[in-house]
Amino acid sequence: MVIIMIERKRLYKDVSRRKVSGVLAGFSDYINGDVTLIRILFVLLSLKFFPLSIVIYIACALIFPDKQDIFNNPN
């Protein structure tokens, strides 16, 4: 009998590596990317789509759970 464990990826805020709220640090963990590159790309996209990018960032900061909450309560 073979048991396969599938790791479920989740978006979260990583407050230990945050600059503002930790949204971009958590997103970089989700896609296995460099947090500095993600931050630079966000700033560049924010210059192009200013009001929308800030609204999306604030919504993510309010919706995403903290990393500690996910690992303490994995449900």
Image (tube, grey):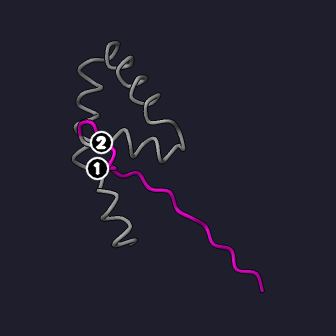
Residue at horizontal 41%, vertical 51%? Answer: 11
* Left or right placement of residue 55 versus residue 13 in this view: left
| Residue 7 versus residue 39 in the image, above or below | below
Q: Amino acid at mark 1?
A: Val
The residue singled out by tag 1 in the image is 15
- Give me the C-alpha separation between circle 1 and circle 2: 5 Å
Badge 1 vs badge 2, beta-carbon distance below 8 Å? yes
Task: Name the quarter where the C terminus is drawn.
Answer: bottom left
| Residue 42 versus residue 74 in the image, above or below | above
Furthest-right residue in this view: 1
Residue at horizontal 27%, vertical 36%? Answer: 19
Q: Main secondary structure of the magenta part?
A: loop
Q: Secondary structure at mark 1?
A: helix
Dot 2 alpha-carbon crowd within 10 angstroms: few under 14, some 14 to 19, many 20 or more: some
Question: Residue 27: which numbered mark, if any?
Answer: none
Q: Quadrant of residue 53?
A: top left
Q: Is residue 18 magenta?
A: yes
| Residue 48 versus residue 7 in the image, above or below | above
Dot 1 alpha-carbon crowd within 10 angstroms: few under 14, some 14 to 19, many 20 or more: some
Furthest-top residue in this view: 48
Span of residues in magenta = 1-20
The residue singled out by tag 2 in the image is 18
Q: Quadrant of residue 44?
A: top left
